[in-house]
Every structure is written in structure tokens, then in C-alpha cells.
Image (cartoon, rainbow, N blue to C red):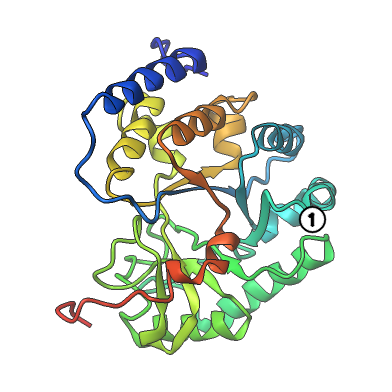
Amino acid sequence: MNPSGKTLLTRREFVATSFLGAATLSLGMRSPLPPPTHRLLLIRFDTESRQKPEMSGFFEKMVAVHRSLKIPATFFCLGAAMELRASEFREFFAEVRNDPLFDLQNHTYSHLGLGYDHGQSVEVLRADIERSFALQERLGGGRPVGVSMPGTGGRDGNNLPGFDATEKSRAELDMLASLGVRMINTFHSGVDAGKTFINYGDLGHPEIMGFPSGNADNSWLRARKYGDPRDYILSQIKERGPRGEPVPVMFHDDTVWIDVNDRNLDIVRFIADAGRQAGFEFVTHRECLQRKALWQNFQLNPQMPS
């Protein structure tokens, strides 16, 4: 996959280059930093496309690639897409339901915004998410415990700094907790949402994990805002690894399959090579939830504004 025609490293070339880098380190150029504790790479797919004919074959290819390379991934499924592509999702859920490589979660039904200064009422948001959860259960995807927050492109006003920001946003978190949600994006004032696991104990929900979210493919893969997509992802891995920071990578099914026409999922294969060469562990979001030490001990900085 190379829409711009630029010359990219092949997987073989990348592995060879990484091997030479590792050899250099072994000759004495060791990092003075302590061993990282959270060197995790989280691949996520927001499966939300409602283009049924165009998405044909996506799930089959994606399952084959992730299994062949043993790459865990989390799938946040949009209710409207599940309804329009019911047979595809039903077959996908049946295929992966008991496979720990595949974590099945939710993305609301209508892509309604959480955490905005305007937007739908808490009651409308609840009904939308309940509808999506029920549909996912009926299709065989189980009861979700995680939600990824949709972006609404300014339709709902400004994105707030966190669930702690307003009375309504706090009520949204309470509503999610009442539905059994136990993991959602890190979304708290003063916290880096792209790098940090948190808990929401200060908002009354220590049982809910906030997971880092970032590197959305709409920017780096489709729009190529940062130049060559592989160079960008490699830079994220190289920068965050020595600091022990997690690397979240967020894909959309239609961005990969339709917009950039990566029908072989070469970008996923590249990330698998790059991440493992750099010593990252690939994990699902559910596995992070189970590793409570990642997020339950998080303490807000006393100097942080509330």
C-alpha cells in the first residue's frame, strides 16, 4: 500500500534495519532509562462502515491476518453498522467469540457524542447505547463492557476536557456505569488522553478504567498529515518505547479497506513487525482491564485543577 508512490521499507528491510539497531545497542549504547512498565501496543478497530458491498471480505481478511501474526485487537462496533451489515457481523462474532485475540466492544448506535458542551441529553444517549448493546448481544457479540467515544465533527459543540468538566458530563459517566461499562477513553481534565491509563475514582467510579486513545488513521493514514504513514507510526513506537508509554493505534474499517485500499492489511503487518522489534507487547483493551495494576493505582496530581 503506497498511495503517494513513495518508496517504503519492505517488511524484510525493516526487520534487517531493526536488527542492526538492536546490535548497536548491544555494543554499549544502552539507554540509561529504567525498564519500562507499560510498553503496550493497543490496536483498535472502530467498525462503523455502512457501505455494505464495499466492505465485503473485510472481516475474513482481518481475522486471517490477526490470527496468522497473533495480533490481539479490540473491535468497537457501531450499532447502525451492525444492523445494516447484520449477516457479516453475526458471522464475525461467531468466528471470534471465544478467541482471546479478539475483544468485542461497542461504539454507540448512532455515533452520538459523549463529553461535549452541547449535544443530546443523557436520556437520549442512554437509549442509544442500550439499543446498540442489545443489538450486539442479539448478533452474538456478547454484552459489551467497553465503549469508545465517537467524534462528532463539531456537531455537538466543543469537546470538553473531561467527564469532570460539567454536571452533564458527570451524569454521562454515571449513566455509562449504570449500563455496566467498565472501560472507556481516558477523559479527564489535565490528563494526557493519548498516553495514560486512569481510573475514575475521583468521580465516584473506581471500577471504570480509562484507556489511552490516539493515532486515529483518518489523520496519519488517510490524510497523511505527518508524511509517510509507516514513518509516522515508527516514530511513535521509537519515542514512546524508551519512556515506557503505551502506543494506541486506532483504525476505522472503511478507512483501511476502502479509503486507502489496503486489502492485504499491510499497515497492520508493518505495525506487528515494528512493535515487536521494539519490545512492545500487543494487548486487547479487555486484557488491560484485567491488569488492574495498570489503572487502579492512578493518582491525580494534587496540583492539577479540578
Q: Residues within 10 Å of mark 1 (few under 14, many from 20)?
A: few
**Residue reaching furthest to the front:** 27
Asked whether 273 or 154 is in front, the reply is: 273
Q: Which residue is drawn at 76% across and 56% down?
A: 83
Q: Where is residue 120 in the image (x, y as percent from the top left)?
A: 49, 75
Q: Which residue is drawn at 45% across and 58% down?
A: 152
Q: Position of residue 110 (x, y in %)?
A: 61, 63
Task: Give residue 64's quadrant in the image.
Answer: top right
Q: Which residue is drawn at 30% across and 31% down?
A: 226
Can residue 47 be seen at all in this image of the molecule?
no
| Picture layout, residue 47 above or below residue 115 | above
Residue tagged 1: 98
Can residue 19 be seen at all in this image of the molecule?
yes
What residue type is disc 1 on? Asn
Asked whether 273 or 194 is in front, the reply is: 273
Asked whether 152 or 234 is in front, the reply is: 234
**Residue reaching furthest to the left:** 303
Q: Which residue is drawn at 54% across and 30% down?
A: 259
Q: How many marks?
A: 1
Is 174 positioned to the left or the right of 95 in the image?
A: left
Is 45 positioned to the left or the right of 133 in the image?
A: left
Which quarter of the figure is the C terminus placed in?
bottom left
Q: Is mark 1 on a helix, strand or loop?
A: loop
Q: Where is residue 100 in the image (x, y as percent from the top left)?
A: 70, 53
Task: Give residue 59's quadrant in the image.
Answer: top right
Q: Where is residue 115 in the image (x, y as percent from the top left)?
A: 41, 72
Task: Give residue 155's quadrant in the image.
Answer: bottom left
